[in-house]
Amino acid sequence: MWGDRCDGWRLVHEQDRSIIHEKMPPGTCETRHFHKQAKQFFFVLTGTMTLEAGGIETVLRAHEGLNVPPNLPHQVFNKSGEDLEFLVISQPSTTDDRYPAPGGTEEERGT
């Protein structure tokens, strides 16, 4: 669904919510961004996620999750040596509600 090395599958895609199953190989990350309307919950299925939100890094392992409120810049990293799989639940959907946030670099994003 996104990136050259990462995959994502839309499980639910409705205007008021979305659920996406994402897979990130070791050493990858997404572009730092924020959502004006959507709140999100990240839930790790397998692997280890580093989630930077508002300048604070949190490490999440399998069966752990974290809420990210609207307007909070955030970025997901896989700094581990194994694949990371997680669910991201957004309410409402993030369609047309994704804005770049300062702080991410091309090198960090692997692009």
Image (cartoon, rainbow, N blue to C red):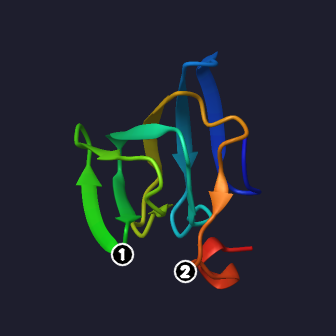
Place of residue 61 in the rendered image (x, y in percent of width and height, measured from the top left): 25, 50
Asked whether, in this view, residue 62 is left or right of residue 92, the answer is: left
Place of residue 18 in the rendered image (x, y in percent of width and height, measured from the top left): 55, 24
Look at the image and tell me in which quarter the C terminus lies: bottom right
- Label 2 sits on what residue type? Gly
Is the residue marked by circle 1 packed among few (<14), some (14-19), or many (20+) residues within 10 Å?
few
| Quadrant in the rendering for residue 65 | top left
Asked whether, in this view, residue 104 is left or right of residue 2, the answer is: left
In depth, the one of 109 and 71 nearer the eye is 71
Who's the residue at 37% across and 61% down the image?
51
Is the residue marked by circle 2 packed among few (<14), some (14-19), or many (20+) residues within 10 Å?
few
Please determine whether, in this image, residue 85 is positioned above or below residue 103.
above
Place of residue 46 in the rendered image (x, y in percent of width and height, measured from the top left): 35, 42
Query: Which element carries disc 2, helix, strand or loop?
Result: loop
Please determine whether, in this image, residue 105 is positioned above or below residue 111.
below
Please determine whether, in this image, residue 55 is positioned above or below residue 13.
below
Place of residue 80 in the rendered image (x, y in percent of width and height, measured from the top left): 39, 66
- Real-space Cα separation, disc 1 to disc 2, in angstroms: 9 Å
Query: Which element carries disc 1, helix, strand or loop?
Result: loop
Residue 77 appears in the picture as rendered = no
Badge 1 or badge 2: first in the primary sequence: 1
Who's the residue at 73% across and 55% down the image?
3
Count the marks: how many? 2
Asked whether, in this view, residue 21 is left or right of residue 65, the answer is: right
In depth, the one of 62 and 14 nearer the eye is 14
Disc marking residue 103: 2
Disc marking residue 109: none
Q: Are marks 1 and 2 in contact (CB under 8 Å)?
A: yes
Q: Which residue is mark 1?
A: 55
